[in-house]
Amino acid sequence: MAKTNRLEESLDDVFVKNAPGLPEGAHKTLVAWAPALTLIAAALSLVAAWGLWHWARTVADLANYANSLCTTYSGVLCGVIPSPFTVWLWLGVAALIAEGVLYALAFTGLRNRTKRGWNYVYYALWLQVVYAVLALFIPYSKLSHFIGSLIVAVIGFYLLFQIRGTYPGAKHGRQAPMPTDRTDNR
């Protein structure tokens, strides 16, 4: 846990102390909308996992069809097109599913303004980085997929660390006043 705290502190230096801060209005809005944004991120992660699996299944079906045509007309067992189902693809799908689950788990914690909710988003963003690296090894994936995933993770870390101080237990980050319109004490 100490290494995680040191990593958090290092990222706090990068994304809060050495980066421009969000305007106060944007900060308050981000804190208020964070629970809903995590549900959207959860849905997008799970849809991306399903899309990746569905794409691979479709390509595998086409590859099997092409290979069977080759075998039928040549009389020799052909393997013209390899299957896209590799260990990297399965790891990518698993990372996206886990990321979606972490975002969904973060909803309650962010709504109640607890550090646990913030931590779930933090871990989900690290899974985004892991997925970016895995995307380099997924068949038919492009370098732009890797770069795009890293950009999303960096923007996510920046926004997350900007609101870090709002959650009890966080030592740094910009502080935002708690909204006064909350009537329930969950």
Image (tube, rainbow, N blue to C red):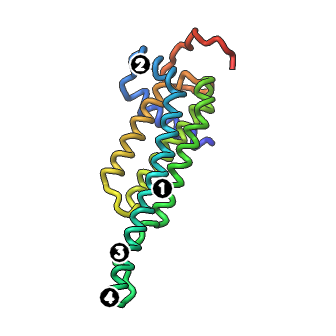
Distance between the alpha carbons at the discs numbered 4 and 3: 12 Å
Q: Quadrant of residue 72?
A: bottom left
Q: Is residue 10 above or below residue 180?
A: below
Q: Which disc, if any, is residue 74?
A: 4
Of the pair 16 and 30, the residue shown nearer to us: 30
Which residue is identified by label 1?
92
The first of marks 2 and 1 along the sequence is: 2
For residue 26, the mark is 2
Disc 3 marks which residue? 66
- Depth check: give the residue in front, 21 or 50: 50
Q: Amino acid at mark 4?
A: Ser
The residue shown at (31%, 54%) is 143
Residue 184 image position (x, y, % from top left): 67, 14
Name the mark nearer the viewer: 2 or 3.
3
Of the image marks 4 and 2, the number of the one nearer the N terminus = 2
Which residue is drawn at the image coordinates 52% and 42% (left, top)? 124
State which quarter of the image contains the C terminus: top right
Q: Tell me the crowding category of disc 4: few under 14, some 14 to 19, or many 20 or more residues within 10 angstroms, Cα based.
A: few
> Percent x, y for residue 65?
38, 73
Q: Position of residue 179 (x, y in %)?
A: 55, 12
- Residue drawn at (52%, 39%), measured in percent from left and top? 42
Quote the CA–CA distance across marks 1 and 3: 26 Å
Query: Residue 147 location, x and y as percent?
Result: 33, 48
C-alpha span from label 4 to label 2: 65 Å
SS category of the residue bearing label 4: helix
Question: In the image, is 50 to the left or to the right of 186?
Answer: left
* Gap between marks 2 and 3 measured at Cα: 53 Å
